[in-house]
Amino acid sequence: MYILDFSCNNCGEHSQPAPGQASAPGEMFPPYIISINGSQDLHNCIVWNNGGCVYSIQITYNLLDSYTVHVDAKGPTGMFSGAGYLRFIDYSGDHYDLSIFSSIRRTHWVEYMSFRPGIKTILWSDTAF
């Protein structure tokens, strides 16, 4: 599978109105694995409060021009610690949101359909978009 290396100048924990942001170097059709600043291990870059983080992101192609973003992640730990929020923006300008509440590491996903399905931007925050 191909690797698409996003760039990020503000890795770490973020809240609105200034979410963390990683940008693609150019448009690429799925399937691919996302790396940030040369690393496929994203847990030091996409970070939320109380130990929440993303470990990896993969974009896959499904049947009938649908796509899935697979996110290996865990949400913040502790009562009332909230969630981790992700927003994926594709090249058509559409966005797909994912909220990670569980503090147990597992794969989460969001499916979408698009004429330009490559992910252009990833945003993350401790607060909802």
Image (cartoon, rainbow, N blue to C red):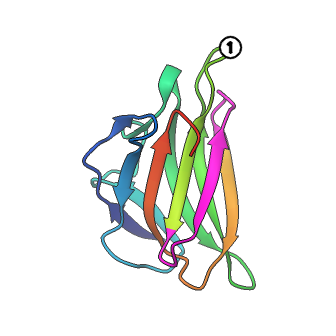
Residue lying furthest left in this view?
Answer: 9
Residue 77 position, x and y percent, is 60, 20
53 above or below 115? above
Q: Position of residue 9 (x, y in %)?
A: 24, 48
Q: Is residue 103 above or below residue 98?
A: above
Decide which of 21, 42 is in the foreground and name it: 21
Q: Position of residue 18 (x, y in %)?
A: 38, 41
Left or right relative to 64: residue 45: left
Residue 46 lies in the magenta-colored region: no
- Please, what is the three-letter code of the amino acid marked with disc 1? Met
Residue 104 higher or lower than 9, as above or below = above
Residue ID for mark 1: 79
Q: Residue at x 33, y 63 (%)?
A: 5
Label 1 residue SS? loop
Left or right, residue 84 beside residue 108? left
Left or right: where 14 falls relative to 108: left
The magenta segment is 90-106
Query: Which residue is at 38% across, 67% downward?
Result: 4
Q: Is residue 94 above or below residue 36?
A: below
Q: Residue at x 43, y 62 (%)?
A: 121
